[in-house]
Image (cartoon, rainbow, N blue to C red):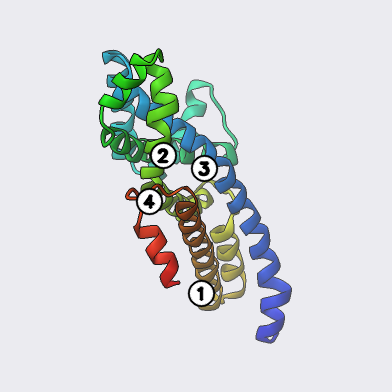
Amino acid sequence: MDQAEFLFQILLPVLMDGLAVTLKLIVLTAPFGLVLGILVAVGRVYGSKNISLICKGAVAFIKGTPLLLMLFILYFGLPSVGITLSAFMASLVGFVMCNGAYNSEYIRGAISSIKEGQIIAAQALGMTRMQAVRHIILPQALIRAIPGLSNEFIYLIKYSSLAYMLTVIELTGAGKMVATKYFEYTEVFVIVGAIYLLLVTITTIAVMLIERKVAVPGMTQSGRNMLDIL
């Protein structure tokens, strides 16, 4: 079998199937992770003492636990207490928890950078505290948090490969299967790496475009300057 036949008839079709699973994991994780991050960040900054403490503890636990260990707990550990998740669902839940925890830190930092006087001014105009947070603080905070959130999205692209450890045949898992069967490890993993690099590059450019679209003068400059260089 020549290299062209191996590449186009065997490797690429399998990798495309794995890539579809990877993209499905990313597309499902990202929005839920963002929503979870917003809720946890708001809970930590504006919630009651108990809510803030719970959010802080949950973030500390997730950040301090290796993601692979968390996936093992969700997939192999939960059945012992009567909760059984499929490999894909366990991976998704683990990724959402991890993504949400780190997103919450970026958003919390962005919220803390906004002056408290804006909430006071909003309340003087008749808004409740939560209305002020929702309509005034969060829009600004999310813009400021874009660089951090984009980094976490890139991490998500890469750590989605851990789903293979739960038998989810995503991109890395598909490559591993072909490499093991045909003993073409170098060629296979170079191509797998190139696909991940392409995904990260597309994400980076998309984030720069988003930053340019939503930029407020004086708030976000780095993304616009980098895009001009490209």
Res 190 label: 1
Tell me whether the residue at label 2 lies in contact with that at label 1, contact meaning CB atoms closer than 8 angstroms.
Answer: no
Task: Give the residue at mark 3.
Answer: 30
**Mark 3: secondary structure:** helix
CA gap, disc 4 and disc 1: 28 Å
Res 147 label: 4
CA gap, disc 3 and disc 4: 15 Å
Please state if 228 lies on the left or on the right of 60 as rendered: right
**Mark 4: secondary structure:** helix
> 193 or 212: which is nearer to us?
212
Q: Give me the residue at 58% from left, 65% from top.
A: 175
CA gap, disc 2 and disc 3: 15 Å
Q: Position of residue 177 (x, y in %)?
A: 59, 63
> 46 or 58: which is nearer to us?
46
Q: Quadrant of residue 178?
A: bottom right
Question: Mark 1: which amino acid?
Answer: Val
Q: Looking at the image, is mark 3 or mark 4 earlier in the sequence?
A: 3
Q: Give me the residue at 71% from left, 76% from top.
A: 8
Res 47 label: none
